[in-house]
Amino acid sequence: MEVTVIPCLKDNYAYLLRAPGSPRAVIVDASEAAPVLAALQKLGVALGGILSTHHHVDHVLGNEELVSRYPGIDVFGSAHDRGRIPAQSRMVVDGETISVEGLTFRCLLVPGHTLGAVAYFGHGAVFTGDTLFAGGCGRLFEGTPGMMNDSLNVKLAALPPDTRVYFGHEYTASNLRFAAHVEPGNAAVTAKAARVAALREKGEPTVPSTLAEERATNPFMRCDSAEIIAHVAERLAGNHAPDAVLGAVRAAKDAF
Ligand code: ZN
Ligand code: FE
């Protein structure tokens, strides 16, 4: 599977996916139509489908225009988001496998940022929308810390460690500043922050990460770190369960 990163809006990423030699591509999170159309044209491919990770407007703004340009294509999204994802034609459920334009993905329901958030896993990659970012996670707009903990540390953490992680926003540098703040002794965070700074200086995206990198550097996937637990201890009232730690780290980041 070829993946092309398409910067959209201020700091969103859409992804163009293509099976080798296929005349049609699939888009993950059509944030806006114009840059997606430009990417399709540059590669000389048509659009064969859209995978939406969640209903937020910065991830689906381009859906209707793209469907009007490529009538009949499917727009996939969570059954939970029915009525909230423009042009949605396919309602996916947790664990469902979908095939589109020669590509196959397992749909993982990963609630937390929103209740209908979906991660699409296939071909050694996972597209996580605003659930898992490099070095961070989405704000808990609809779900609970327990849901986000299950999504990150049970479901996504069960995927192979070398799975490439393609996330919804370029927040990596600021996420890693917070990661270093809550876990200053983590050398993997320091090393990754240096790599990320070099990429951003050149204007390059920090995607993809890998699950192994996230488990080493992302405070929301490190709820068992003694240093992190100590950092948020006053928010925990003695409860060191992973969902409590995740909630405390999320609250600390919201105030950072
Ligand atoms: Zn969102
Ligand atoms: Fe977003």
Image (cartoon, rainbow, N blue to C red):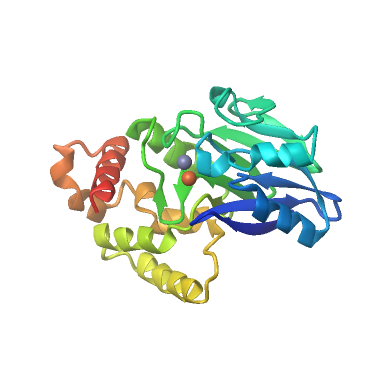
Q: Can residue 159 be seen in this view?
A: no
Q: In this view, does 79 lie to the left or right of 132?
A: right
Q: Tell how many labels.
A: 0
Please tell me which residue is depicted at 31% across the width and 47% down the height of the picture: 224
Question: Measuring 56% from the left and 59% from the top, which residue is drawn there?
Answer: 208
Residue situated in front as seen by the camera: 16 or 248: 16
Residue 239 visible to an observer of this rendering: yes
Q: Which residue occupies the foreground of this view, 101 or 44?
A: 44
Residue 176 percent across, percent down from the top left: 36, 62
Quarter occupied by residue 75: top right
* In front of the other: 149 or 18: 18
| Left/right of residue 39 with respect to residue 202 in the rendered view | right
Measured from the top left, where is residue 108 in percent x and y?
A: 57, 34
Residue 1 position (above or below residue 184):
above
Which residue does the image show at 26% across and 36% down from the upper left?
A: 244
Residue 203 in the image: above or below residue 235: below
Q: In which quarter of the image is residue 118?
A: top right
78 w.r.t. 43: above or below? above
Image coords of residue 84 (percent x, y): 55, 27
Identity of the residue drawn at 20% across and 36% down: 239
Quarter of the image with the C terminus in it: bottom left
**What percent of the width, then of the height, locates residue 247?**
28, 39
Q: In the drawing, does residue 140 fall left or right of residue 102? A: left
